[in-house]
Image (cartoon, helix red, strand yellow):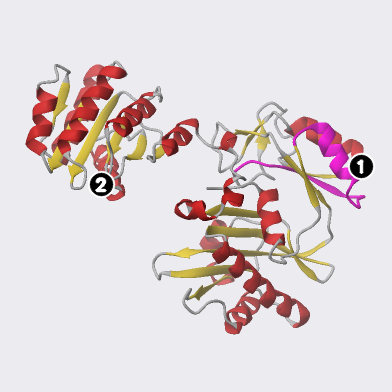
Amino acid sequence: MNIHEYQAKELLAKFGIAIPKGIAAMSVAEAVEAAKQLPGPLYVVKSQIHAGGRGKGTFKELAPGSKGGVRLAKSLEEVEAHAKDMLGNTLVTIQTGDAGKQVNRLYITDGVDIGKEYYLSMLVDRATGRIAMIASTEGGMSIEDVAHDTPEKIATITIDPAQGFMPHHGRALAFGLKLKGDLAKQAQVLGKQLYDAFVALDCAMIEINPLAECDGKLMVLDTKMSFDSNALYRHPDVMALRDETEEDPAEIEASKYDLAYIKLDGNIGCMVNGAGLAMATMDIIKLNGEFPANFLDVGGGANKEKVTAAFKIILKDPAVKGILVNIFGGIMKCDIIAEGIVAAAKEVNLSVPLVVRLEGTNVAQGKEILETSGLPIVSAADLGDAAKKIVAEVRKAA
C-alpha cells in the first residue's frame, strides 16, 4: 500500500525526523488558508498523487509547457492560482503513463533555503534477506539515472534485522553522503530514526528525494512510503491513510476477495493459482505472440465465490479478448475450481474464448465437469498447449 507525501512526512515526524512545516488541502480555499498558517513569504504548492516525477509533470488540461505539479509561490495570490491550476486536473508524469492521475489533494509547505540535496532510501533487499539503506550525493534527480551514469556515487549499506541499526551503519551513511562535522552527526541520527520507522511501520520502502541541507540542518523535502500489505492488520492507523481514488478500481475489488490482481496492457486475461505459476503463464503468452491483460493469483484456497469474482474482474477490462485459466490443484481441488469456472461463465454470460488447463488433485473430475457443462470451454493438456490455444482463439475471433 502507498500513501501520499504529506501522510508519509507526518509519520516520519513522529520518529523525530525533520520536515518543513506543511498542511494538506482539498480545495483552493483550504490551500490559501494553509499558506496563511505558514511563516512564508515563500511557499511550495505540491500536487499529491501516488507517482513520482511530479515537478516535471504536465497537466492535460493546461497549455503545453505550463508549470508542473510542484510549484513555488511568493504570495497568497500565487498559491491560489497554482491551486486552481492543479486541483481537479490530470497530472501526467513519467510514472503515471499517458493516462495520468487526477489531482484531488494538495500539500502546501513552507519554502526553505536549500544548500545541497542528497538521496536516501531504505528497502528490503530480498537477495540478502537484509534491509538496505541506499544513499547518494546526487539528490533531486532520478536514482535510476544516477545508477546508470555514475554508479560510484551510490552507497548501499545493508543492515541485518537481527542485529539492528548500529553506530557503524550511521558512520557509513555519513561517509556515503560525504558529510562532515555536525552534518555527519545528524546523518547518523537520521539513519537510526529512519530504520526505526521502517521496522516499526512494516514498510516495504521509504524514499527521501531530496534530503536537503537547509541552514545547517538535514531536512526531508520529499518522500515516498509503501508498506507490506501482509502486515497492515497490525497498523490500523496506517490503513486509515489509504486513498482508494489513487488505486485501480479493479484492484480494490480484487482485494475484497483476497485476490492478487494487477492490470496490465494486453488482451488475454489470466486466472492462475500461485504467483510463480502466474508469472510463467504471462511469460508463455508473450512467447506465443500476445500479451497478458493482467496478473491474477486466486491463491491456494479459492472457492466458487472467489473464482466468480475473478472472472468478473477480468471481464471488466474491455481490452480482454480471451481468458486463460491455469490451475495446479494442490490444496485447491480441480473439481471445485471447475465448478466455479462453470458457474462464473454462466453468471457473467461469457462472450470471449476461454481456455482452461487443470492439473493436480481431482483433475479427472474437474475436466469432466468442464466437458459436460455445455459451455464452449477449450481444454488444454499442459501450459504450452494452453497458451497456443488461447492465442489461436483470440486471433480467430479478431
Nearer to us in this view, 239 or 85: 239
Which residue is painted at 24% across and 23% down in the image? Answer: 343
Q: Which mark is residue 75?
A: 1
- Give the mark nearest the N terminus, 1 or 2: 1
Q: Identify the image quadrant of the C terminus.
A: top left
Local crowd size for mark 2, using a 10 Å CA cut-off: few (<14), some (14–19), many (≥20): some
In the rendered image, residue 4, in percent from the top left (x then y), is placed at 64, 46
Q: Is residue 120 above or below residue 244?
A: below
The mark lying in front, picked from 1 and 2, is: 2
For mark 2, what is the residue? 277
SS of the residue under disc 2: helix
Which residue is painted at 18% across and 31% down in the image? Answer: 338
Three-letter code for the amino acid on which mark 2 is drawn: Leu
Residue 351 location, quadrant: top left
Three-letter code for the amino acid on which mark 1 is drawn: Ser
Q: Left or right: 257 with respect to 171?
A: left
Q: Is residue 287 above or below residue 324?
A: below
In the rendered image, residue 151, in percent from the top left (x then y), is placed at 53, 67
In the rendered image, residue 220, in percent from the top left (x then y), is placed at 72, 61
> What segment is highlighted magenta in the picture?
26-50
Residue 29 location, quadrant: top right
